[in-house]
Amino acid sequence: MLFTTVWDMINKLQQSRADLSHHKKMQAYLKPDLLILDELGYRSMAEQTVEDFFEIISKRYEKGPLILTTNRQLEEWDKVFIDKTLTAAVVDRFLHHARIIEIKGESYRFRHRD
């Protein structure tokens, strides 16, 4: 199992392009039995980052489970991925076997602040 934020994964994949370790770093996100990506939707993704994210989703599709947390409704994902074609491709693969669990209510962190 591997737990990381979406942006930590994206940043590490982008950095790995600079030192030519991209393939090895990509494998680090494809190998775990379960990949948990936290915080999708806080920032929009540039074209290159969307392509890296799509590659992870695409290569894990029907091969390895993925948990994704987001504060965005599915209808808003095009604001995250910008490119409508890539948004549709990501959503299509992600939702094919998905179970969506929606949690509503006040933020746990906000509720328990000092």
Image (cartoon, rainbow, N blue to C red):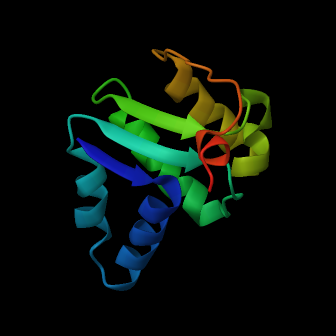
Nearer to the camera, 38 or 9: 38
* Image position of 11 with respect to 104: above or below: below
Who's the residue at 42% across and 32% down the image?
67
Expressed as whole percent of the image width and height from the top left, the position of residue 32 reads: 21, 42
Q: Residue furthest bottom?
A: 19
When asked about the image quadrant of residue 112, the answer is top right
When asked about the image quadrant of residue 62, the answer is top left
* Image position of 109 with respect to 17: above or below: above
* Image position of 105 with respect to 68: above or below: above
Is 60 left or right of 51, judged from the image as shown? left
Nearer to the camera, 100 or 105: 105
How many tags in the picture?
0
Rendered-image quadrant of the N terminus: top left
Nearer to the camera, 39 or 108: 108
Rendered-image quadrant of the C terminus: bottom right
Who's the residue at 43% across and 38% down the image?
58
Is 63 left or right of 101, judged from the image as shown? left
When asked about the image quadrant of residue 77, the answer is top right
Expressed as whole percent of the image width and height from the top left, the position of residue 48 reads: 58, 64
Expressed as whole percent of the image width and height from the top left, the position of residue 25 reads: 28, 64
Q: Residue furthest front?
A: 114
* Image position of 35 with respect to 47: above or below: above
Expressed as whole percent of the image width and height from the top left, the position of residue 103 reads: 62, 23
